[in-house]
Amino acid sequence: MSFIVRRLARSALLLFGVSILCFLFTEMAPGSFFDEMRLNPQISPETIANLRTHYGLDQPLVVRYERWLKSALRGDLGISIAYNSPVTPLLWSRAKNTLLLTTTALLLTWIISVPLGVWAASRRGGLLDRLITLASAFLISVPELVLAVALLAVAVRWGILRTGGMISADFESLSMWAKLQDVISHLVLPVCILVLAETAVIVRHVRASVLETLQSPYVQAARGFGISRTRLLFRHVLPVAANPAISLLGFSLAGLLSGSLMVEVVCGWPGLGPLILEATLSRDLYLVIGGIMLSALFMVMGNLVADMLLSALDPRIRGNEDKAEAEQGLHAA
Amino acid sequence: MGSNLPTDSPINSPNNSASVPEALLRVQGLTKRYVRGGLWRKRLPVAAVSCADFYIPRGQTFALVGESGSGKSTVARCVTRLERPDSGSILIGGTDIAQLMSRDLAPFRADVQMVFQDAVTSMNPRFSALDVIEEPLLINCKAHDTPGASERRDLVRALMIEVGLSAAWMNRSILHFSGGQRQRLALARALALRPQLLVLDEALSGLDLSTQAQIANLLLDLQAAHSLTYLLISHDLALVTLLADVIGVMSEGETVEVGPTRQIISEANHSTTKKLVAAAKAAGSNLAQIAGASA
Amino acid sequence: MTHMDEEKANLVEVRDLTVTYSPEIGVPIRAVDGVSIDIRQAEVVGILGESGSGKSTLASAMLRLLPPHASCEAGSLTVSGPDLMKLDLMKLSESQLRAIRGRIVSMIPQDPALSLNPVMTVGSQVSEALRAHLPLPAEQRRERVLELLGEVGFGNANACEIYTAYPHQLSGGQRQRIAIAQAVSCRPALLIADEPTSKLDAPLQTEIVALLSRIRKQHGMAILFISHDPALFAGFADRIAVMYAGRIVEVGSSAQIFARPFHPYTQALLRLAKESILALVSSPAPAARARLSAIDGESPNPDQWPPGCRYEPRCSERMEICSRRYPSQFIPEPSRPVNCFKYGE
């Protein structure tokens, strides 16, 4: 289907742009990986120069970018100076953990916030609606970091949840089932933090969107035809209200990603977050770029999924894409 | 301006150049296409206006009528240069503004003003009447000749009285004005820069009958007072017959028939014109019969 | 008010209907103020009124479909059901009202551009009311919908195409036809049409009125037709009620109202309507840019109705008494009530 091809092409273009900006900004940023070595009298300037040549950092930006792009297209994102190993497998081993965290959080967020938002909107002004509005306002106004630390403190104090890392020390010795239980018990805390922070935002959007649709003339008209409340909500309102909420999906994924980077650091989850933070602090050039590119890739994929959902749900979007001619025919009829 | 008002109705035939009175606006071979699609999509040009030809002598009212989608609003947007036409010329007092860049357009913006159908959406809802009317004064005058605040208030007061609004309402939010009053506000705003040509894009549609009549009368008064020229865009032939000297009929992006109002109503040639006239007459004939019976 | 000629039973009886909007900020607004009106079986009643007269509020109130911040009181608001039982809409629960909406009383919304759901196909939207009221198997329901589409002017071949189309693919006139098909799908006894043509071009307006007229003749339903344009009533409405500033000021048969309007407001409005079309119909005289005989001023604000006659500030025949109290109903001729001191005191 040409629609998907077009969206893919657009995504590729976007990633291309991000990579250029990445190179430009890392070039412009002050400091380099070797700054610390330069201060060390035991390391001669020649050694550093050799190292720079070894990693290709003595080349002009354009040449470096061209080399990086060529290898990146084959899946090789360069070499980490700090780890002295290829960036791709390094990132991938961590990315799996981040994906586990974010997709779990994403699914839970949507499973919780859509029904809550619809419920709040359909009983507007009721106790539940006021409670949800208040709670989400509170959660939005509390910085995510504070929320994370607070939950962490509670978890540690009460000892209900495993904190720190993704697996216990004796993980290898556990049975398959126990391994799964172990990971889940570690997963609960960071997922909770992410879900709380994101749900607060999304519930509000879903609620606003459903409220708006409920007041639209076509829903009022449908009420005038005596359509039952439930059917009105699920058949007439939700498909329309889903539209802006789904556009949000792409953004919420981005929010989750940046949120998860922070949460990973706080909870010690071995995901991309700690890795990228460390790489940024030490100016580990290609690891930073690789990390950013991977985040960008996740986001682009999220938006792609959202776009495809939208076009499946909304005939106006589909219509604009490929039905222009059919439409004109219908007008003539 | 306005000293040489032509008195008789013009004969709109381009060949007959000797008898053509001075035209304030002359639109020739105007075309405008919208392109649907974009970077990755198949481009589908949709012709909004394929050929528009007409002219308006100074001080007269020209009505552009047609069914919805016939391209009449696009012509209005091109004349006011809210859109840039693809080809053709738009002569205002002899200068072709069709392809001018925005910097060179500035002097013409003051001469040509537009009034939209929906006065509500064409105004910032947070504005007061004063804000709405003085806005063009602030935007369009060069820094050195922008009138001072008190001078502006006097100007706005005069304009409000002229369009039949109480000047005491100057500081009221526009939300407190009724539909008819907002349309008066829109006219005051359009008049603020003393334009020569007013483009009225369905400015009387969607209003109640009595409000419509009030605004129509106001338009006649303003035209008499300032020798204004009107380009009236409408789908309502009944109203148009009362206001227009000349009617141009648009169909599928083309001006298919142009002629004096009376001629268009009584001896329509083109099928679209016939259709529009028949519909307008049908709408009124029952009423007229009953009216006739009682008279 | 029309008890004298009962040649047909009253389908709808509205007594002293008052609707008050209480906005969060500002004073309460009495949009409809003590309106009484009867609609007989299979009768077309026109409500002639301009914006702010409360005619749209009246329409919504008759379906009990007002927004939450509106309160509605009525002496009675009854509709005769299929078994001729009188149902008082003021006393019914929400679910009982649902059984009436679309089935006994149905409404055509004002703006066809906004009144259809953008993500549902035409076919499924038209079948919604059927689904709510008549238990039919899917195949039969589809047949009914196609039939309805044919009824509102989509020919056989066209109907199938329209069935699967989405609203954004249709023109304004086509959408309004769909809205009509939706509203009449369950053969209601009363169809409320709230300015169904005001957003359409002039040629389409007559088409839609003609369609409504045809459907009404076919199925014998009553229609409450609301408009600000008297021309649309001519040849269509049996009776006309003129509304001004929240109240009905005059009622009469369509012929009577057009020939001899009693209320000064009706007189002025009809004079205006005739003027604007006279030039068109009897076009011999060159259009001598004559000013229209407009009614000066604006209708009063609903948050502060004048104590006397609400038309008094604009009336050319006002008397001293007019500004003091609201004129009660006078009946100068049988079945022609009018609220004006010209006809009694």
Image: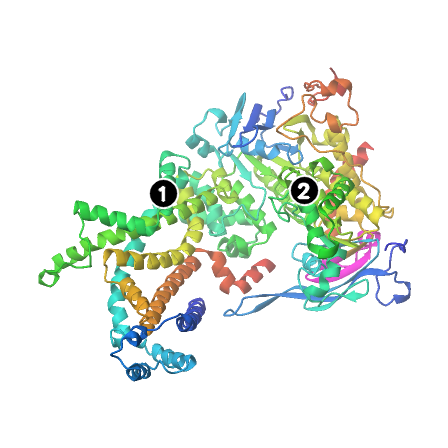
> Which of these two is toward me, A185 or A309?
A185
**What is the span of residues highlighted in magenta in the rendered image?**
B249-274
Residue ranking furthest to the top:
C345
Mark 1: which amino acid? Phe
Residue A41 is drawn in which quadrant?
bottom left
Q: Chain of mark 1?
A: A
> Which of these two is toward me, C284 or C293?
C293
Residue ranking furthest to the front:
A41
Asked whether residue B254 is drawn in magenta, I would say yes
Element under disc 1:
helix
Mark 2 — residue? B129
How far from the left and from the top, in percent, is residue C58?
58, 31
* Image quarter hosting the C terminus of chain A: bottom right
> Which of these two is toward me, A144 or C334?
A144
Q: CA distance from mark 2 to mark 1?
A: 40 Å
How far from the left and from the top, in percent, is residue A20?
43, 73
Mark 1 — residue? A138
Element under disc 2:
helix
Asked whether residue A237 is drawn in magenta, I would say no
Q: Tell me, for residue B173, which label it has, or none.
A: none
The residue lying at 30 percent from left, 52 percent from top is A194
The residue lying at 26 percent from left, 79 percent from top is A43
The residue lying at 37 percent from left, 66 percent from top is A296
The residue lying at 56 percent from left, 41 percent from top is C109
How far from the left and from the top, in percent, is residue B223?
82, 48
